[in-house]
Amino acid sequence: MSLAVLSVLPVTVSSQTFETAAEAVANMRVGWNLGNTLDSNSGNVNNMWIEAWTNRSPSAYETAWGQPVTTPALFKMFKEAGFNAIRVPVTWYPHMEATFNTVKWNSAKNALEPWDPATDDIGTKIQTAWMQRVHEIVDYVIGQGMYCILNIHHDTGNDNTAWIVADEANYTKQRERFEAVWKQIAEEFKDYDEHLLFEGYNEMTDVAKSWCFASFGASGGYNASIATSAYNAINSYAQSFVNTVRSTGGKNAQRNLIVSTYAACCGEGSWNAHLLDPLKQMKKPAGETDHVIFEVHSYPSIKNSLASAKTSVTNMMSSLQTLLASKGAPVIIGEWGTANDIQSNTDDYDVRRADKVSFARHFVEQAKAKGIATFYWMGLSDGDHRSVPEFNQSELVDAIIKGYYGEQGNTQVSTPVSSGLQPQTYYDLQGRKQQTLRHGINIVRASDGSVRKVLK
């Protein structure tokens, strides 16, 4: 029988005390986003194409943006490569109480009839079938001994289907619905251990649909009234999220929770005096000590100058440490990549691969040095490659792994248990005692008293 040690760090078995947020961030190491999967949605009230042309099953949404149905093997591959965390973005509004019955083809207009959320309200209740599929994928991740981050995703953002906006009036209007959604999610997973984290919201933008900093999209590039309302709303939504999850009790009382800055802005760059405002204006939710994490996203451009991009990232990491972590909570970069990946039909990995690979290693190295965990957005294994599963950007995977583990790469998964230690007690991932090792991830207490995660 061949065994492999997955973690030689101490693991607490059947403990009532969760690891701190800082410990969780350190233990995540490097992560990846299961993007364009459970976050898929139509995104336009005037073209609700998924609702019109599919049976609206969970798999119809899961595959709508070009990805296959997710399997456990995908996460096993990432785990064995050295990734220890998966962010699972989820869009919830299509899976609540709206019927979308008016979304039908109008031959005379040669277009779909629009969806009117005012008359076909999404309500507050999450559909059972959708929650079950979300639950399955969370289990796939945690079943590999990895950390899983679960969030509210494209219910925020600039699409006209988004119902969560960084605006005080919107917070007043949507607070009850927002808290109802989080209460259901929290109740669903209240017995899960510290490997599951919740992220309150994704990239929440203001009424001017601004990126970079609040009110950037307003006339003149800045509006103090819009900005103040946006930052106040972000902090209000963050507090509501934390309060709601904590109120459900159980393990949610100590669960590590993640709150994002305005639009998940990272403060990168120096071209505008307001770029650091999202970091400066973000507050640590009241009543929290050591179980909350700040999140930002980063997509710098490497097209014109790799050296400049690297310098900018180094400066950004310092700003995250001095302006966010200094508030008393660790930081993760919940999404990162390079700007050209998402702004054009070309991919930096294809057109400037050497620069992309060099940048990725630098990015991860700088983040690790500042105690920041990183989650690469998409790529790495995309489309049909996920079904195999296989990496279609293997050089990028190698750069990320070496950026964290060093030139030797990840050696932890392949380290054999051959030191003479004898296993004494076996547990599953929920800390329940079992008679023998089972296929998958096990927790083993050895004869010297140490506790390890072991793959059979």
Image: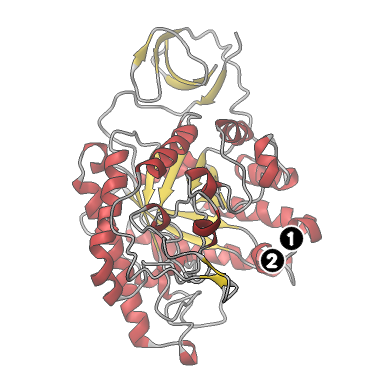
Seen as rendered, the residue at the extreme front is 108
**Quadrant location of residue 450?**
top left
Residue 317 visible in the current orientation: no
The location of residue 114, given as percent across then percent down, is 47, 71
Name the quarter where the C terminus is drawn: top right
**Which residue position holds label 2?**
340
Type of amino acid at the residue the image marks with label 2: Asn
Please name the residue shown 79% across and 55% down the image.
Answer: 354
Q: Residues within 10 Å of mark 1 (few under 14, many from 20)?
A: many
Type of amino acid at the residue the image marks with label 1: Asp
The location of residue 449, given as percent across then percent down, is 38, 15
- The residues bearing labels 1 and 2 have C-alpha atoms spaced at a distance of 6 Å
Foreground of the two, 242 or 121: 121
**Quadrant location of residue 339?**
bottom right
The location of residue 100, given as percent across then percent down, is 42, 60
Seen as rendered, the residue at the extreme bottom is 220
Q: Secondary structure at mark 1?
A: helix
Q: Residues within 10 Å of mark 2 (few under 14, many from 20)?
A: some
How is the structure coloured here?
secondary structure
The location of residue 338, given as percent across then percent down, is 65, 62
Reading the chain from its start, which is encountered first: label 1 or label 2? 2
Horizontal side of 383 relative to 441 (left or right) equals: right
Give the total number of marks visible in the rendering: 2
**Which residue position holds label 1?**
348
Residue 379 visible in the current orientation: yes
Are the residues flagged by discs 1 and 2 in contact, CB closer than 8 Å? yes
Q: Secondary structure at mark 2?
A: helix
Name the quarter where the N terminus is drawn: top right
Foreground of the two, 68 or 14: 68
Q: Which mark is residue 124?
A: none
